[in-house]
Amino acid sequence: MALIELRGITKTYHIGDMSVEVLRGVDLTVESGELLAIMGESGGGKSTLMNIIGFLDSPSGGGYQFEGQDAGHLDDNELAHIRNQKIGFIFQQFNLLPRLNALENVMLPLVYRGVPPRQREKVAKQMLKQVGMADRMAHRPPELSGGQQQRVAIARALSGSPSLILADEPTGALDSKVSQEILDIFLELNRENKITTVMVTHDPKVGKQCRRTVRMADGHLLEV
């Protein structure tokens, strides 16, 4: 079953009198349980495509179906519901709140979902254990290494049991050893939990280990 279907997706930004065409008729199907890498040079449209897939931005043209539902017919509240309930986001810069410890950061999305305190603490602890951070739950982000912070960010994304994980350069700020450790977590989650994962990366070592790789260049998508 296709989780994501994009057909003829375009995106044009208007800056003053200028028009910048970032996506030029992108077609992409992502099946449930897939692990997909989107590769390409900076400025090729990777992050724009990721933002459209995650409903953080809207296309200028084309069609998008998510879980068989036409996204073009959804209002802002319905789109926000999908972002909150169906998608887990992971970013290069972690985006953890420095005043909260690891456990509190992972629980935060569950607070917004109205999950009772005991249940969200239980879930958050399970997720931190799954990514190897059971002994760092009380540490705040400044007290953690980059790799540890990214593990917390992955646990946070998993806490809501999403249908889709979107990871934008998740290893970009890490050294090669830690990058492989983080990638191994994604590979295990996909293999064991069948979580559909779409990962933007410029690192060919990451792309080679994903089940499928596509390449963005000048707003076009090419199968590799």
Image: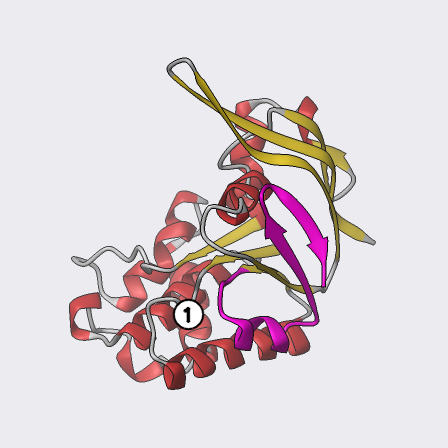
Residue 193, percent from left and from top: 65, 72
Q: Would you identify the image quadrant in which residue 195 lies?
A: bottom right
Residue 183 x %, y %: 50, 76
Residue 12 sits inside the magenta stretch: no
Query: What's the amino acid at mark 1?
Result: Thr
Assess whether residue 205 is covered by the magenta stretch.
yes
Q: Between 119 and 39, which is closer to the camera in this rendering?
A: 39
Looking at the picture, tell me which residue is in the foreground, 212 or 64.
212
Q: Is residue 121 left or right of residue 8?
A: left
Residue 173 position within the rendered picture, expressed as x and y whole percent measured from the top left: 33, 68
User: Which residue is located at x 79 percent, y 51 percent?
Assistant: 2
Residue 207 spot, x, y in % from top left: 59, 70
In the image, 21 versus 206, the foreground residue is 21
Q: State how the image is colored.
A: secondary structure
Query: Residue 175 appears in which quarter of the rendering?
Result: bottom left
- The answer to whether residue 163 is visible is no
Q: Left or right of 18: which side holds 6?
A: right
Question: Viewer-proximal residue, 189 or 34?
Answer: 34
Judge left or right: residue 27 versus residue 199. right
Question: Can you identify the residue that label 1 sits on?
Answer: 171
Q: Quadrant of the N terminus?
A: bottom right
From the viewer's perspective, is residue 151 above or below residue 52?
A: below
Query: Residue at 28% across / 73% down in the picture?
Result: 146
- When the figure is inspected, residue 82 is found, relative to residue 15, above or below; the finding is below
Task: Please state the extent of the stretch shown in magenta in the rendering.
Answer: 200-224
